[in-house]
């Protein structure tokens, strides 16, 4: 999936559920930070790649070299495995969930911390699980550190040689549905501005790829 889709999916799937737990255990303070953490977790697995891409771009390395060579280097592969690890995010999610359950009614600082960690790890976990079936030859070692195996899916979320065009249509329909769902659920101006921005980003990103390749 594209990063924007990960953000929309995590927001729709996790913010309502986490908000219920938040209201049940921590009664004071604003709740917006929980949404910010969900978005942070959704971006986290792609963040290292974006940072490395920006550094390469700053050195005037062309996109063909970045995505044709650098992407497959040992260094990028290792960082990709660490930030897309299903076992790591599962373990953190399980640990924070247990902590949250134990401390839910006792200390609000602990339960708030645990809930925050749960927001980040569940969101990142959702990212890695939904990416797993959608990478052909550019996937990650999703089971690091248990295994270095990289799944080669017949479907790619972008590559036209591996149903990338068909998947893009599905992903755009999914994104449209998620934007509509979130639009109806959250009426505050900030959330709606972000939703418009996320819609526009699909046009921006596809235009960039069309110009580049
Ligand atoms: Zn990803």
Image: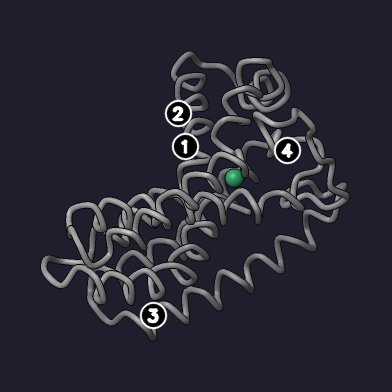
What residue did someone put label 3 on?
183
Residue found at x 18% / y 58% = 107
Circle 4 packing at 10 Å, graded few (<14), some (14-19), many (20+), is: many
Report how far apart the C-alphas of labels 4 and 3 lie in the structure: 32 Å
Give the secondary structure at mark 4. Answer: loop
Question: Which sits in the foreground, 153 or 108?
Answer: 108
Quadrant assignment, res 166 = bottom right
Q: Is residue 162 left or right of residue 119?
A: right
Circle 2 packing at 10 Å, graded few (<14), some (14-19), many (20+), is: few
Pick whichever of labels 2 and 3 is earlier in the sequence. Answer: 2
Residue 7: percent from the left, percent from the top?
47, 58
Give the secondary structure at mark 3. Answer: helix
What residue did someone put label 1 on?
47
Residue found at x 55% / y 39% = 88
What residue did someone put label 2 on?
51
Give the secondary structure at mark 2. Answer: helix
Report how far apart the C-alphas of labels 2 and 3 lie in the structure: 30 Å
Question: Which sits in the foreground, 34 or 107?
Answer: 107
What residue did someone put label 4 on?
139
Q: Is residue 23 left or right of residue 30?
A: right
Residue 101: percent from the left, percent from the top?
36, 63
């Amino acid at each position: 999936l594209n990063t924007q889709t990960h953000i929309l999916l995590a927001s729709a799937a996790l913010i309502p559920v986490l908000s219920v737990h938040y209201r049940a255990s921590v009664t004071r303070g604003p709740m917006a930070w929980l949404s910010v953490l969900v978005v942070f977790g959704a971006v986290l697995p792609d963040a290292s790649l974006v940072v490395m891409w920006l550094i390469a771009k700053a050195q005037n390395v062309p996109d063909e070299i970045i995505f044709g060579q650098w992407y497959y280097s040992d260094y990028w592969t290792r960082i990709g495995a660490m930030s897309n690890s299903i076992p790591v995010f599962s373990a953190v999610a399980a640990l924070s969930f247990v902590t949250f359950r134990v401390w839910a009614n006792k200390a609000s600082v602990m339960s708030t911390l645990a809930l925050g960690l749960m927001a980040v790890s569940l969101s990142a976990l959702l990212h890695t699980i939904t990416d797993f079936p959608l990478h052909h030859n550019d996937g990650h070692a999703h089971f690091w550190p248990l295994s270095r195996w990289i799944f080669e899916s017949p479907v790619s979320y972008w590559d036209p040689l591996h149903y990338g065009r068909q998947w893009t249509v599905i992903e755009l329909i999914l994104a449209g549905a998620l934007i509509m769902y979130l639009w109806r659920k959250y009426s505050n101006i900030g959330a709606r501005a972000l939703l418009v921005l996320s819609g526009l980003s699909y046009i921006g990103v596809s235009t960039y790829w069309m110009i580049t390749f």
